[in-house]
Amino acid sequence: MEGKRLEKRTLMLKKPERSNGLKPLFPYPALLIKDNEEKRTLIVADLHIGFEHSLAQEGIYLPSQTSKITDKLLKILNEYELNELIILGDVKHTIPKISLREWRDVPEFFDKISTAIKKVSIILGNHDGNLEPLIPPAIKILPSTGIIIGKNTKIGLFHGHAWPKPEVLASDILVMGHIHPIVKFFDSFGFTILRQVWMKAKCKGDMLAKAYLKYSKIKDEYEPNKQFYRKFGVKMKDPILITMPAFNDALGGMPVNKRKKKWMGPVLSNCEADINNADLYLLDGTYLSTIAALPTRF
């Protein structure tokens, strides 16, 4: 078992997802994408700045985590030579309004981050309503339908709460956040163990194509992949799906080893059979197992 874990961890570090330019930055919940030697993009997801305000309303008083998030991100930005930072949604926490803490903390966060990297983009998540007044004009806001980066290998980036657009869905690799994946166990004494994880699955393109056609209210006149190509002009593949851990490690998360009736978000919920066989990695790169092989007692 140990040899198997080491082998899978090495694979993840050296050639993750068979793309020459995609690398999880263990032990950080961050992803590095290299298009070439000149273009290096950092991907993080789910900051949820200001989530402490929601806890305070429930009588739980947690000090602001913004400085911790900022320092961790600055450490990564200073450690690696990067051209761009892309945040996969949920920069702030409150829905749909803006809390007083967010009015203070979000602009302060971006002021500090902008000293380390000039090009910053945000793909909108479900918590990012009314985000525009909080961020500097230089920061680019991208729609929740996502974007594609990469030349030889197409990498589709989106938050995960909504369908990405067809050309993003048809990428070789899909990268999303949204669910803050964790594993949850009990030991023999009843103590709870929670750990953030990376989740990597191989999805069936025909299932995604069929679900997207249904979402788009397009009748099945042909096989799903053919119909998808006929309607949208892009060929659906069997993509690798990577679900990122939340960058804010003080957040809760979805225990992926708890059996669910339905996963959150349209892509996960329509890859359910594949997601149950997803590989899980801790933040340090240690391979755990597939979801299906993990214990489910809660």
Image: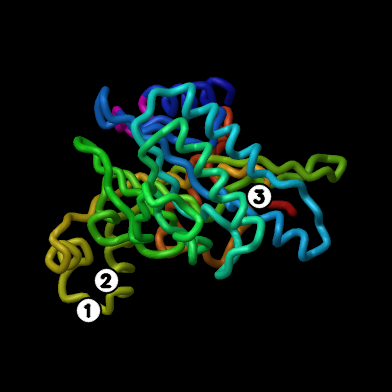
> For mark 1, does the 10 Å Cα neighbourhood hold few (<14), some (14 to 19), or many (20 or more) residues?
few
**Is residue 238 part of the magenta span, yes or no?**
no
**Is residue 19 part of the magenta span, yes or no?**
yes
Residue type, mark 3 in image? Leu
Q: Are marks 1 and 2 in contact (CB under 8 Å)?
A: yes
Left or right: where 27 falls relative to 31: right
Percent of width and height locating residue 181: 57, 48
Q: Which dot marks residue 213?
A: 2
Mark 1 or mark 2, earlier in chain? 2
Percent of width and height locating residue 298: 74, 54
Residue under pointer 1: 219
Q: Quadrant of the N terminus?
A: top right
Left or right: where 22 falls relative to 233: right
Residue nearer the viewer, 207 or 293: 207
At numbered mark 3, what does the secondary structure look like: helix, strand or loop? loop
Residue nearer the viewer, 253 or 190: 253
Left or right: where 139 falls relative to 262: left
Mark 2 or mark 3, earlier in chain? 2
Residue 75 figure quarter? top right
Label 2 – label 3 distance at C-alpha: 34 Å
- Front tag of 2 and 3: 3
Percent of width and height locating residue 218: 23, 77
Mark 3 or mark 1, earlier in chain? 1
Left or right: where 295 falls relative to 28: right
Residue type, mark 1 in image? Lys
Q: Which dot marks residue 251?
A: 3
What residue appears at the point 25 percent right and 53 percent down from the top-left corner?
170
At numbered mark 1, what does the secondary structure look like: helix, strand or loop? loop
